[in-house]
Image: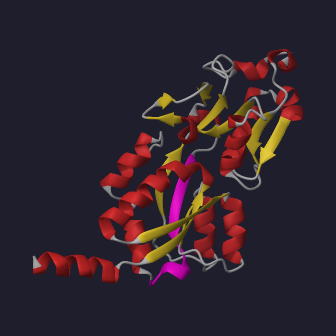
């Protein structure tokens, strides 16, 4: 009994905390991972969600994040080169998928042909949401798709931009926008769309959404930050990540 009590004291006494900047598309899986991480290690992860571009600016200005889970692979690499991240800690934790989504169950077909409709107004489509391509990699990917399909004239006049993919999802989920390019992870579980209708965009239509994590200088001596980086590469975290529609 004494041994068990001592073991519990060891976990509590050495448990730490880590503040993590997390790309908005990874909100749901990271919340699950953080819960499991705390249960398994005793460490607590404080999560901030937002656009990768905005986090980059905040980190440059001294924001006290110990780690970044970006929506791309370029930002963590840039932070390494600029001396703001620990060299050798960067890895791809997930590869995202883009989807065109509507809360209406019949609006989006399985090839995204709705975007070619000659009269979107007749379909009740006044606004189409996407993340700001200058701040969010999912927004940049959405713009690539629009250009590849050749539907700029049809779609661009109706575009409304969210600061992040999280805000973009809110536009569509509240039906302030009737269509939107969102992360597949926001609208699916175990490979099934949870609500409405969606087109899962083929990965060949845009730059791969490789999402890298990196340990920032603030976290280089933080035991909780080091433990989290290791945990993200473990089987339990990978199972959660796949559950939300990401590739590894």
Image position of 220 (left or right of 206): left
Q: Position of residue 242 (x, y in %)?
A: 41, 43
Where is 2 relative to 193, above or below? below
- Quadrant, the N terminus: bottom left
Where is 233 relative to 62, above or below? above
> Can residue 248 be spotted in the picture?
no
How many numbered marks does the figure carry? 0
Image position of 147 (left or right of 230): right
Q: How is the image coloured?
A: secondary structure
Q: Position of residue 110 (x, y in %)?
A: 60, 20
Residue 35 highlighted magenta (yes or no): no
> Can residue 57 be spotted in the picture?
yes
To which quarter of the image does residue 200 belong? top right
For image coordinates 36% across by 47% down, the residue present is: 239
Where is 108 relative to 239, above or below? above
To which quarter of the image does residue 178 belong? top right
Range drawn in magenta: 209-221
Image position of 139 (left or right of 95): right
Image position of 245 (left or right of 143): left
For image coordinates 69% across by 76% down, the residue present is: 60
Q: Position of residue 130 (x, y in %)?
A: 74, 41
Viewer-proximal residue among 124 and 22: 124
Residue projecting furthest to the front: 1
To which quarter of the image does residue 208 belong? top right
């Amino acid at each position: 009994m004494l041994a068990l009590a001592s073991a519990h004291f060891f976990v509590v006494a050495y448990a730490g905390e880590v503040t993590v900047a997390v790309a908005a598309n990874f909100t749901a899986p990271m919340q699950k991972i953080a819960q499991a991480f705390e249960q398994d290690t005793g460490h607590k992860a404080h999560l901030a969600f937002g656009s990768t571009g905005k986090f980059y600016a905040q980190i440059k200005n001294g924001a006290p994040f110990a780690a970044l889970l970006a929506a791309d692979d370029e930002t963590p690499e840039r932070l390494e080169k600029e001396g703001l991240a620990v060299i050798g800690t960067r890895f791809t934790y997930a590869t995202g998928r883009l989807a065109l989504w509507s809360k209406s169950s019949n609006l989006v077909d399985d090839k995204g042909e709705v975007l070619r409709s000659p009269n979107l107004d007749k379909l009740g489509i006044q606004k189409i949401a996407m993340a700001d391509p200058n701040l969010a990699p999912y927004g940049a990917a959405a713009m690539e798709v629009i250009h590849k399909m050749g539907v700029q004239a049809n779609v661009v006049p109706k575009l409304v931009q969210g600061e992040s993919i999280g805000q973009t999802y809110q536009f569509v989920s509240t039906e302030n926008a009737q269509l939107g390019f969102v992360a597949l992870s926001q609208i699916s579980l175990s490979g099934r769309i949870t609500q409405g209708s969606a087109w899962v965009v083929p990965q060949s239509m845009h730059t791969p959404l490789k999402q890298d994590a990196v340990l920032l200088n603030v976290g280089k001596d933080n035991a909780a930050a080091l433990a989290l980086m290791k945990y993200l590469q473990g089987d339990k975290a990978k199972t959660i990540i796949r559950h939300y529609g990401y590739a590894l």
